[in-house]
Image (cartoon, rainbow, N blue to C red):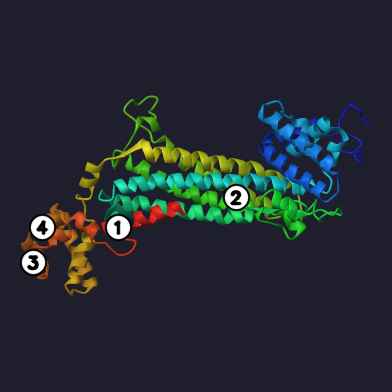
Amino acid sequence: MNQGKKTWSDRFESALHPAIARFNASIGFDIELIEYDITGSIAHAKMLAHTGIISKEEGQQLITGLEQIRLEYQEGRFNPGIDAEDVHFAVERRLTQLMGDVGKKLHTARSRNDQVGTDIRLYLRDQIQGIRIQLREWQGVLLKQAETHVETLIPGYTHLQRAQPVSLAHHLLAYFQMAQRDWERLGEIYHRTNISPLGSGALAGTTFPIDRHYTAAELKFGGVYANSLDGVSDRDFAIEFLCAASLIMVHLSRFSEELILWGSQEFSFIKFQDSCSTGSSIMPQKKNPDIPELVRGKTGRVFGHLQALLTIMKGLPLAYNKDLQEDKEALFDGVKTIEACLEAMTILLREGIEFKTERLEAAVNEDFSNATDVADYLAAKGVPFREAYNLVGKVVKTSLAAGKLLKDLTLEEWQALHPQFEADIYAAIAPRQVVAARNSYGGTGFEQVRSAIKSAKEQLLG
C-alpha cells in the first residue's frame, strides 16, 4: 500500500485516482450544509450522552469542538478542500484534530446516510420559511398596487384577443391568489420536510440504545421516520419543494410575459423605470424589460431541476445510493433562483414600473369588448340570449365594415336592429359601467374588487 496516499479505510489497499477523487467529492457544493451539519451533530452528541452511549463529559467536549468549528467557518478560518470529500467528513476530521480521540466518537450510532438526510431537511425547512416570507412581501406589493388601481380599467384578454374590460386591481389580485396558493403549498410541504431521519443509520437502524425522539425534539422536528429504509432514501420532500418552486416560477413567468407585452410600444400600458431596465448596445432608443425576461428564462432552469430529481429517484432501489448526491445542487440552485426571482419581481412591481392610466383608459374605449354587454342588455329585456348573441355578432360585423364602434351607433340604428334597444344602451355599454356591472362573487365589479382587497388583507395576516 502507498503510505503517502489516503485510503477510504483499512478495507482498501490503494487510494482513489486523483480524477476519481475529484469526481466523487461533493465538498464543492455541500459545504452549503456545514452549519446544519454542525447543528445536527450537536443534537446527536447530546443524545449519545443522554443515553449513556458516551459520557456526559465526552458529550460536552464534542459540543465544544463543534461550536469551535462553526466559529472558524463563520470567520473564514475553516475552508476544507477536495481531500475532505464531503462536508460531513470535513467536520468530523476537524473535530478529531481539535478534540483528539473523543472526536472519533461522534459518529457512533450514525451513518452519513441519515446524517445527510437530516442536514438537507434542516436546510430546506429554513429555506421554505424564508421563501414564504418573500411570497408575503410579493403579495403585499400586488395588494398595494391593487388598492391604487381599483377603478383603473385595462383590457381583459382571452386567446390574447380583446375580450372584456376589467379592473386593473382585479387583474393584479389574480396573481395575489396564485401567490396565496404558493404560500399555502409550501406550508404543507414544510410539515413533510420537518421529519427526522436521524437514527435510521445506514439503512437498518442501529444496535445502540439511541433515542430518536430526543434528537428530533432537539432539532425541533415534528416527528421521526417510522421506517429506517424510507428515512435514508426518501427525497419526496425535495421533489415536492421543486414542484412548488416550479409553480411559483410559472406564476412569476406568466406575470413577466404580461409585463413584457404591456411594456411594448404596441401595447404601451406600462413604462419601465430606469432603475429596473437597461438599453441596447447599438439602438439608443430602446429600454429593455430585463427583469421579467430573466424571470421567464430562469423558469426553465427550475423546471430542469425538478425533472433531474425525478429522474434520479425513479429507478433507485432501497436504500441509499450515491445517485442521491446529485439532489443537492438541484435543490440549492432551485432555492437561490426562486429567492432571486421573487426579490427582483417585488422590486420591479413596487418601484420599477408605472401604469399609463391615460393609455389604459383609451384602450378600453377603442374596441368591441362591450359586445357581450349588448347581448346581456337584450337578454335582460326578455330576448333569448342565443338570439341576442347572434344579433350582436351581426352588429359587430356591420360596424367593422362601417369603421364604427358600438358606442358610435345612433339610437335609430340600434332600434332598427331590435325594438328593445332604448337610450340607456349607451350607459350600459360604457366601459366603466361594463366593469361595475360584473358584481357577481369573484367578479371584476368595483364592489367585488374592494371586498377582495379586504379579504386579501386578512389573508396576509394569516
Q: Which residue is mark 1?
A: 444
Compared to 287, does 434 lie above or below? below
Is residue 74 left or right of 408 when viewed as pictured?
A: right
User: Which amino acid does the dot numbered 2 rest on?
Assistant: Gln
Q: Secondary structure at mark 3?
A: helix
Q: Which residue is mark 4?
A: 409
Q: Image quarter for residue 209? A: bottom right
Give the label, 3 or 1, closer to the camera: 1
Q: Image quarter for residue 7? A: top right
User: Which amino acid does the dot numbered 1 rest on?
Assistant: Thr
Which of disc 1 and disc 3 is earlier in sequence?
A: 3
Residue located 40% across and 51% down the image: 175
Q: Secondary structure at mark 2?
A: helix
Q: Which residue is mark 2?
A: 307
How far across and down, in percent of the image, does residue 117 sit?
71, 48
Between the residue at mark 3 and the residue at mark 1, the CA separation in whole angstroms equals 32 Å
Query: Which quadrant would the N terminus be assigned to in this image?
Result: top right
Which of disc 2 and disc 1 is earlier in sequence?
A: 2
Which of disc 1 and disc 4 is earlier in sequence?
A: 4
User: Which amino acid does the dot numbered 4 rest on?
Assistant: Leu
User: Which amino acid does the dot numbered 3 rest on?
Assistant: Ala
Query: Is the residue under label 2 in contact with that under label 4 (CB below 8 Å)?
Result: no
Q: Which residue is mark 3?
A: 416
Which of disc 3 and disc 4 is earlier in sequence?
A: 4
Q: Secondary structure at mark 1?
A: loop
Compared to 294, does 435 lie above or below? below
